[in-house]
Image (cartoon, rainbow, N blue to C red):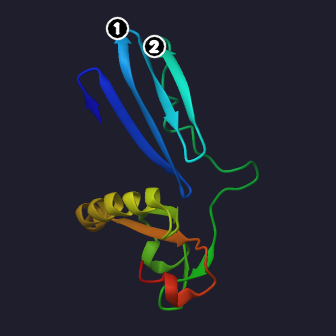
């Protein structure tokens, strides 16, 4: 969130919250604090005119020797789900890894749910692979 010359960014790394807040101090710099549950660290930064994002088509790839992703896990009803299932043949399949305990994952789920509603008729499917902190399936399946 930016208000005039001040900014605040928050996130979770797993279950740990982080807050970055500060102020733009000139055309090309800022100062502020990076705050975690354990400490606050003073930070400063200067704009790097050469900074660039990597090519989005090359940041994710399969390891050498692999040509596809494979998995088989039970869904919420206990039925095995796999990318080789006929329901996914010829479709774009987004595989997301999540946990009901993860705030970032919950935010992503809201985004993906809206995106799915607008794109499922165009051949898009989403599979969420959940990794939970509890071994008790019943206590986590409704999150």
From the viewer's perspective, is residue 54 above or below residue 125?
A: above
Image spot of residue 107 (x, y percent): 38, 58
Q: CA distance from mark 1 to mark 2?
A: 8 Å
Image spot of residue 105 (x, y percent): 46, 60
Q: Is residue 100 left or right of residue 69?
A: left
From the viewer's perspective, is residue 30 above or below residue 65?
A: above
From the viewer's perspective, is residue 21 above or below residue 137?
A: above
Q: Nearer the viewer, residue 10 or 61?
A: 10
Residue sitting at x 54%, y 70%: 129
Q: Residues within 10 Å of mark 2 (few under 14, many from 20)?
A: few
Q: Which residue is the extreme one toward the right? A: 65
From the viewer's perspective, is residue 43 above or below residue 87?
A: above
Question: Which part of the image, by quadrant, shows the C terminus?
Answer: bottom left
Q: Which residue is mark 1?
A: 27
Image spot of residue 71 (x, y percent): 63, 72
Q: Nearer the viewer, residue 77 or 16?
A: 16
Mark 1 in CB contact with mark 2 (< 8 angstroms): yes
Q: Which residue is the extreme one toward the top? A: 27
Tell me which label, 1 or 2, sits earlier in the chain.
Answer: 1
Q: Which residue is mark 2?
A: 47
| Callout 2: SS | loop
Q: Is residue 10 left or right of residue 132?
A: left
| Callout 1: SS | loop
Residue sitting at x 51%, y 79%: 85
Q: Residues within 10 Å of mark 1 (few under 14, many from 20)?
A: few
Image spot of residue 99 (x, y percent): 52, 68
Where, by quadrant of the figure, is residue 5 drawn?
A: top left
């Amino acid at each position: 969130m930016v208000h005039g010359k001040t900014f605040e960014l928050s996130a979770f790394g797993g279950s740990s919250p982080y807050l970055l807040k500060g102020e733009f101090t000139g055309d090309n710099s800022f100062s502020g604090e990076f705050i975690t549950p354990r400490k606050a660290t003073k930070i400063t930064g200067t704009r790097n005119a050469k900074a660039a994002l990597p090519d989005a088509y090359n940041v994710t790839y399969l390891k050498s020797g692999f040509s596809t992703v494979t998995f088989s896990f039970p869904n919420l009803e206990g039925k095995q789900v796999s990318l080789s299932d006929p329901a996914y043949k010829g479709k774009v399949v987004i595989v997301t890894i999540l946990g009901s305990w993860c705030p970032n994952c919950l935010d992503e789920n809201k985004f993906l749910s809206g995106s799915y509603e607008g794109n499922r008729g165009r051949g898009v499917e989403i599979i969420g692979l959940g990794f939970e902190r509890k071994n008790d399936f019943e206590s986590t399946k409704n999150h």
